[in-house]
Image (cartoon, rainbow, N blue to C red):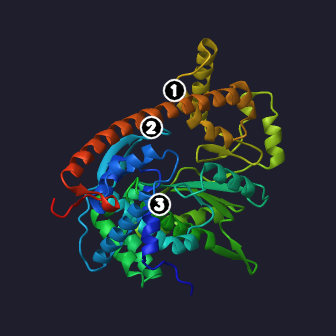
Amino acid sequence: MKQRYRELDRDLCYAAVEKCFDGKWNRNDVLTDIEEWTGYSRNQIREYKIDHPGHEFPIKYAILDERADALMDMIREIERGIDPDFDLVKIHRRADAATGKMRDIAYLCIRMQLLGHCLQLGLEPLLKARILPCQHASLPGRGPTRLVRQVRRLLRKRHIKYFRKTDCKNAYGSTMYGDVIEIIRGEIPDATWILRGLEVMARYAPGGHLIIGGFLDAWLFNLVMSYAIREALSAAGKRRGQRIRMVAGCAGYMDDVVFMSGSKKGLKEGTKICGAYLLDGFGIQSKHTTGTIRLMEREEERKRKARASPAGRGCPAIDVAGYRISRTHCRMRGRNAKRTRRSYLRAWREYRETGTIGRQRAAQIISRNGIIQGADSYRFMEKYQVVTLRRMARKIMGYWGRKQERARKEIMQDAVEKYRKHRETLEGDHWNYAGGKPIRAAGG
């Protein structure tokens, strides 16, 4: 059997540090971690960026090397049972922009984030083997638009006639680290460094369950859901000696899963099997957000959409990931369309009156671009001047981005000047900077 995990080595730790720090080199918590564990100061990073704009700073690779060594030492100590003494996970209440629900979003310290990235890279072969192609959300390259394309391909099959949608109640809060560790121990019992690392994550996780906002936690929850979906897809009955699958296809957006089938009874049994597996194995309660709904054929939908009365044009559709998907068309979910329409109307009014739009309005236009692109929104784009406003919004956000970058560079320049003056004072006091680190000179 092919090995389903990666052994711990320095290259793995280096890749984890590089991945974790990517795009975060200006963040205060990352710079503080660099100063603490490598000895390089943030002023040295700023100085090189000021003197060599547009170039990679060579000190970056030295920092990654030293931080990778420190990470590997920490994981070796974890293997020997030494507690890394992480900072406590901080929980913030934040309103979900899509639904308005208040959610607990966690912040993990940088050392805990580094451990999570390293464990994810170690588990990568297992995750690739187990996570199904029909699972989306919180996975690279698997967003709402890809989910829409996949569901529309499934609906082209004429044998799919019914669908049913399920959701998990308090999904992350019900998925305990201990249950996930048992699954991974059964799959890769020899990966002791991964199992010990997960046990440490479990000790520091509030309540011992998966953390909303954690990088590793999203992968682990998708791993759990893959087993439940696989149970439903593998369920089959026999008719006249022939094996017939109860569920013909499915699509999942994190804990929202849509099951499709040609049999009403088979669909009901398949969703029941999935819910029973989640409840018995992980204590996750799966609820039905829709009943068993029959989809129309393409010809029926076209006739329905051609009716004179708007009230009579409605068709059964799969409501998932912000879209309502049917056989012949895909449109935005009602509340998303309402918010998007409101943003574009206000932006167009402002554009006609002033010739431009504000920064906040431009940010709204760009943030709502994805939901429009995933649907059949040609008339919407024409009616609400989407192309014109999107082009204007990109220019405005580009202007503010350049302005913010100039202000950041001015602050860096000021900090570097103070740092150089301080260094001149130290050099006059018999200090030197061989290799980029302050070392007391002999006789100083």
CA gap, disc 3 to disc 2?
31 Å
**Residue shown at 50% from the left, 39% from the top:** 98
Left or right position of 67 against 161: left
Which residue does the numbered mark 2 point to in the structure image?
A: 100
Which residue lies at the image location 35% right of the left edge and 53% below the top edge? Answer: 30
- C-beta proximity under 8 Å, tags 1 and 3: no
Label 3 or label 2, whichever comes before in sequence order? 3
SS class, disc 3: helix
Q: Tell me if residue 397 comes above or below residue 14 in the rendering.
A: above
Q: Which residue is mark 3?
A: 19
SS label for mark 2: loop
Residue marked by disc 1 = 359
How far is disc 2 from disc 1 in space, using C-alphas?
23 Å
Local packing at callout 2 (Cα closer than 10 Å; few below 14, some 14-19, many 20+) is few
Amino acid residing under circle 3: Lys
Residue reaching furthest top?
353
Percent of width and height locating residue 117: 43, 64
Pair 3/2: label in front: 3
Name the image quarter holding residue 443: bottom left
Q: Which mark is residue 299?
A: none
Q: Is the residue 426 above or below the residue 113 in the image?
A: above
Q: Earlier in the sequence, mark 2 or mark 1?
A: 2
Give the percent coordinates (x, y) of residue 198: 36, 70
Q: CA distance from mark 1 to mark 3?
A: 31 Å
